[in-house]
Image (cartoon, rainbow, N blue to C red):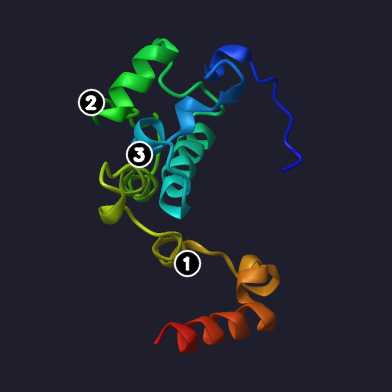
Amino acid sequence: FGLARDIYETDYYRRGGRSFLPIRWMAPESLRDGRFDTLSDVWSFGVLLWEIATFAEQPYQGYGNEEVVHYVRYGNITLERPPNCPEILHKLMHACWTFSPGDRISFRSIVDELVPYENEDFRLNAYYHTQPHLLQDQILIVTND
């Protein structure tokens, strides 16, 4: 994104002795079954929102990686509401962290939740509101019907 930050090895968990996984950002189904899809990305997006609201605190600070893996896999832990976090953002985070992937909010619904909070400059300049994007949306709607 153009944002630089030191990533400490302790933020990651080595699985199978080879690769590092960002366990503090991973959805329960990813930790349990190794399943990664759009809905697991939504979970990670919720953690990213939390990081932004906390000015880059480590998710699940105070817990070891093994504890995070165990608690998230079984739905026994959630991230606390950041101080001064707007209620709409906090509700959105929790919608991203719904334990069952099938009940989790979609990225489309996340966008729909945030659109009322756009400012005029965003409406004039964001790709989301450009003609190619709107045409792509129409194609997807027709294709999915």
Neighbours of disc 3 within 10 Å: few (<14), some (14-19), many (20+): some
In this figure, which residue is indicated by the disc labeled 2? 76
Q: In the depicted view, which residue is nearer to us: 134 or 103?
A: 103
Q: In the depicted view, which residue is nearer to us: 119 or 2?
A: 2
Of circles 1 and 3, which is in front? 3
Instruction: Look at the numbered discs 1 and 2 and tell me whether their residues touch, using CB distance below 8 Å.
Output: no
In this figure, which residue is indicated by the disc labeled 1? 115
Which mark sits nearer the N-terminus, 2 or 3?
3
Amino acid residing under circle 2: Asn
* Quadrant showing the C terminus: bottom left
Count of numbered badges drawn on the protein: 3
Amino acid residing under circle 1: Val
Q: Residue at x 56, y 12 (%)?
A: 10
Provide residue 16's location: percent of width, then percent of height.
52, 19
Neighbours of disc 1 within 10 Å: few (<14), some (14-19), many (20+): few
In this figure, which residue is indicated by the disc labeled 3? 29
Q: Residue at x 47, y 40 (%)?
A: 44
**Secondary-structure class at tag 2:** loop
Amino acid residing under circle 3: Glu
Which mark sits nearer the N-terminus, 1 or 3?
3
Q: How far apart are marks 2 and 3 (CA)?
A: 14 Å
Residue 113 position (above or below residue 22): below
Provide residue 81's location: percent of width, then percent of height.
34, 32
Provide residue 113's location: percent of width, then percent of height.
39, 62
Instruction: Look at the numbered discs 2 and 3 and tell me whether their residues touch, using CB distance below 8 Å.
Output: no
Neighbours of disc 2 within 10 Å: few (<14), some (14-19), many (20+): few
Of circles 2 and 3, which is in front? 3
**Secondary-structure class at tag 1:** helix
Horizontally, residue 123 falls left or right of residue 36, namely right
Residue 29 position (above or below residue 56): below
Q: Quadrant of residue 122?
A: bottom right
